[in-house]
Structure formats: structure tokens, C-alpha cells
Image (cartoon, helix red, strand yellow):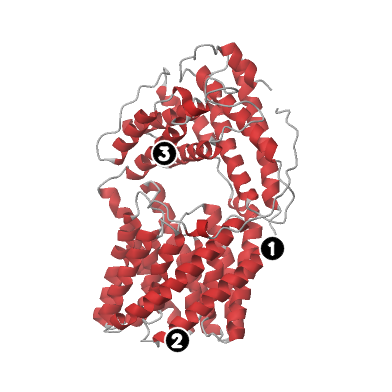
Amino acid sequence: MSSATPVPSVRTARRLPLAGALRLGRPSDIWFKPALSVVASVAPPGLLLVALGRLDLALYTMAGSLCALYAHNRPYAARARALAGVVLGMLGGLAVALVAASLTGNAVVLVTVGAVLAAVQKALCDATRIGPPGNVVLTFVSSASLFAPQTLGQVPGHLAPAAAAGAWAWLVGMAPALIRPHGPERRATAHALDAAAAYAATAAARTGPGADDDGHTGPGTDDGNTGARSVGYAAVQSAWQSLLSTGNRPSDGRRALDRLVVRAEVALAAPAEADPERLRAWARTLRGTGPVPAVDDPRTDASDLLGPAAERATPRRTLWGALAPLTPLAVRTALGCALAGYASLALGIGRPYWALVTAAALYQANLTLTWSRAVQRVVGNLAGVLLFAAVAPVAHLGPLALVLCCLAFSFGAEALISRNYWLGSVCVTPLALLVTEFAGPQRTGALVTERAADTLVGALVGFVAALAVTNRRAGDRVARCLTAIDRAREAAARALADPQAAPAVLEAARRDLAAALVDLRAAADAASGEWWQRALPEERVVLAEQSGHRTLAATVRRQGLLPTSPGTGTDTDTEDVRP
């Protein structure tokens, strides 16, 4: 166990980022996939409704079509399950909203129902790690439907087109499997290799006074590249999870991907001995359509790569176990959405669900990220209403023009949002405004004014609610992760000290320690952006990470994944990591 004593850090005054929140990043590797998928999912139902003269039902078909935005990074076996869950979740939220709308016209009651739905959707999306766009699309659908005039007898007729469009969205999401059935896991492996190469590329700079032969600095120091190393291990863990989700009977191609992920793990554990260019070359090949690069595995039994040890790297969590830590975020969402909707009603703006959705979109892993999202939402929405005002005359030319404008903005939103949330919001906002016109043309000036006002109200009230609901559990999670690191490192050190330790035991110890390090970094990052809590043991976190990574490097050498470096024998490695 680490002998480091927790040292309370002194909190400095927080600086709220502005320019940084709006800085553009690189587009996602697969930005075109969700962009094309949403167009392919929205277009057939929308054009069919235009031909039938029933564009008033487009709100419901749009609800199902937007499910095509989800799960693009998942292997197809896992994607099938995830998309089915999204469609069912969307239908469940829509059903509750439509029934509530048919039973009461009281706006306060409807806002309350919408806030509770938003909190449930937020908690479930985070607990299941469904990924972008998360709860925002589901909350938009359910909140808008709360204020659609409805009778109880109409509910089945409105759910039916949503279900049909959802089924079509499922088919659209699964269609790429016919062309490139192993594309998602290849991309996940390529991302792990690139992340490992980025970390390994700095090994020479880190090797110097106070550094060992693997490029790791000594206790109490910081190698200046913790972020890159953490990104690398997170990418490797994601790659393993992606590969495991493809099934328990790996093919030859899957085994080749397994070996490449091991190469990425090895590069992270011993970056000074890795070849970044070779790692990047493998990644480039994987992003193409050629065969998976063949990589020799120095171990005699390569089939053990994904044995029980790999399964332990992705522990199965119960739904309740995943939901419990999210209670503060769920409370924030419920309170913020409710207060935003009530404030909109009190101001007489007229469309409280816009303020509710704005608040729901703000809440991220911590308050610092929530602030950044608030800035992005306001900037993007205000620019978006101006874009809507310019495009509205074209959309008003007829139903076909309206649907085509929606398709254009759907594509633009998904093409741009990976660069920065605010840039995607510039297209999302006019799309949301055009959806309100499916039932009939609206006055452009009134829509622009109401949307701008609701954006400001929702962002302000939502962020104040986030300040009011503290998340003390963030610090508790860091403490639990530190304990888990100590246990995982002790287990690895015992395995290293045992000359008779079985290869499976070493593999399990290495995977458990790597997973614990990823969890610790995620918990520390989340807690460092949370306000109004006790100081974090930052020095102990750094020491735990450094000692854990040295233990990983020693384990890699013991497993025979690397030749022993000159001057670093097995005895030295074992001594360096014993508890």
C-alpha cells in the first residue's frame, strides 16, 4: 500500500472559462456518420407526411427519427441493443408526456412533469453511458410533446408514427454493418494506438534526472504529461470494452485487434521503448478497409488475451449501483428544469419547455463543465435564432421547403457539433424552431423573441440551481478510487513477488490496476471541477498514479511483453513495486 499521507490542497479562486469554452476543436473521425444517418432517418417519414398532407404528425415521426443519432461508436451487436433501448426510452417518455398533456392543461403541472422526466432521462443516459447526444434529444421530445394539444384517444395514434420512425431509425443505424461489419471496433483500436503513440512520443523528453528507464518520474514529481497518459489508458479501456461487446468467441480478425490493443497497453506502460510511428501506422491501416495488421505476440498462448482477466476489466454494474452516484446530478436537473419552466411562465414568455430543455442541456459531470456548457448554449442559441430569422422566409414557401430546411439543419448540426457544442447549436436552434411550424406557420418575430428569452432564462436559472445543489459525493468517489488503487497495486505487487505466479494471475492484476487508474483519473477530474466541497488529496492522487504506472510497467516486463531494459532487472522492478 502506498505510504503517501493525504495532503489537503488549498483551493484557489476559480476562474470561469469564457474564450476556452468557445474554442473550436477537431471534428470527430466519424462526424459524417451521425450527420448522414439523421438525414436518412428523417427524410422518408417527413417526405411521406408531405405527400399525405399530414405534416402535423411530423413532431412524432421526428421523435423516432432522432434515435438514429445514438450509438455510432458501438460495435453492431452492442449497437443493436443500445438503439433498441433508446427507441423504447423515447417512446416511454413520449407516452408519459402525451398522456399528461391529454389529462391537464395546467402549465405548472406540465412543467413539473417535464422536469421529473428530464431528471430520469439524465440519470438513465449517464448510468447506461449511452453517449452523445445523451438526454437532451429525449428531453426535447418529451417536453415539446407536453404542450402539444392532445386528447387521450389521440395518444395511440401519435405513438404509432413515432414507433414506426424509431424502427426505421434502428435500421438506419444498423445498415453500415452490411458494408463494414467490424468498423467500430477497428476505430476504437486505432484510437487506442494513436493515444498511446501521442504519449510515447514524449518519452525522450521525460527521460532524464529523476526518471526511470520507462520514462516515469519519481515519487512526488509530475512528469508533465499526466493528461496524455490518462487519455491513453482511457482509450485502451474503451477499446477492450468495444472488443468484449462483440461476443465471447473471437475470430482471427478479433484476435489480431486484441494484440494491437495489447501493444497500446505496452506503449503506455513503457513509453521509452515504444515506436510511436509504428503505432500510428497501425492506426492508419485500421481506419482503412484493408486487413488488420498482423502483430506477433511474445507470449506462447495468445488466446488468453481476452480470458477471465479481460472480463474483470469491464465489471458488470447493477443499474442501481450506476444510478446511486448520479443522485446529485438528477436533483440538479429536476430542480433546474422546474425552476426554469416556472420562471418562463412567470415572465409570460409562452413556451416554457424551451427554458426547461435549455436547463436540461447544461448539466455535465461537474460545475465547471456545466458553466462551459451554459456559455456554449447561450452563444449557439442566440446565433441560431438569427439564422432562423434569415431562413424562415424560405421555409414558409411550403411543406416541402420546410422539410428540406429541417434536413439541412439536421445534417449541419451533427456535422458541426463535434467541433464545439455551440457551433452545433447554431443549427440545432433553427431546427427546433422549424419543428414548431409542422402544425402551421408561426410568426417569425415572436418565435425569435421567445426562444432568445427562454434561452437566457433557462441558462441563468439552470446554472443557479446547479450552484444550489452541491455534489459532495465527488470527493467520496476519489477516496474510494484511491482505496481501489492501493488494493489493485498490492495485488499486482504480490503477483510480481511470486516467481510461480500464473500468467492469468499477472494478466488479471495488470488489467485490474489499469482499470483502477482510469477510474481514479476520471474521478479526480470530475471532483476538481466541482465547487463547495472539501479540498481534494491532490498529492496522494499524483503519488498513487505514479506508483501505479510503475507497477504496470514492471508487470508488463514480467509478462514478457517487453525485453528487459539494460540496467533494469526483474529484481529491481519487483523491489520498486512491493507493498
Q: Helix, strand, or loop for circle 3?
A: helix
Residue for point 57% across, 32% down: 223
First in residue order: circle 2 vs circle 3: 3
Between disc 2 and disc 3, the foreground one is 2
Between disc 3 and disc 1, the foreground one is 1
- Residue at the spot of label 3: 243
On the image, the x and y values in percent for residue 473 come to: 69, 52
Q: Amino acid at mark 2?
A: Ala
Q: Nearer the viewer, residue 180 or 187?
A: 187
Is residue 10 visible in the rendered image? The answer is yes
On the image, the x and y values in percent for residue 259 come to: 39, 28
- Residue at the spot of label 1: 469
Q: Amino acid at mark 1?
A: Val
Mark 2 vs mark 3, CA separation in Å: 51 Å
> Where the N terminus falls, by quadrant?
top right
- Residue at the spot of label 2: 446
Neighbour tally class for label 1: few under 14, some 14-19, many 20 plus, Cα within 10 Å: some
Q: Helix, strand, or loop for circle 1?
A: loop
Q: Helix, strand, or loop for circle 2?
A: helix
On the image, the x and y values in percent for residue 31 come to: 35, 54
Q: Nearer the viewer, residue 292 or 302?
A: 292
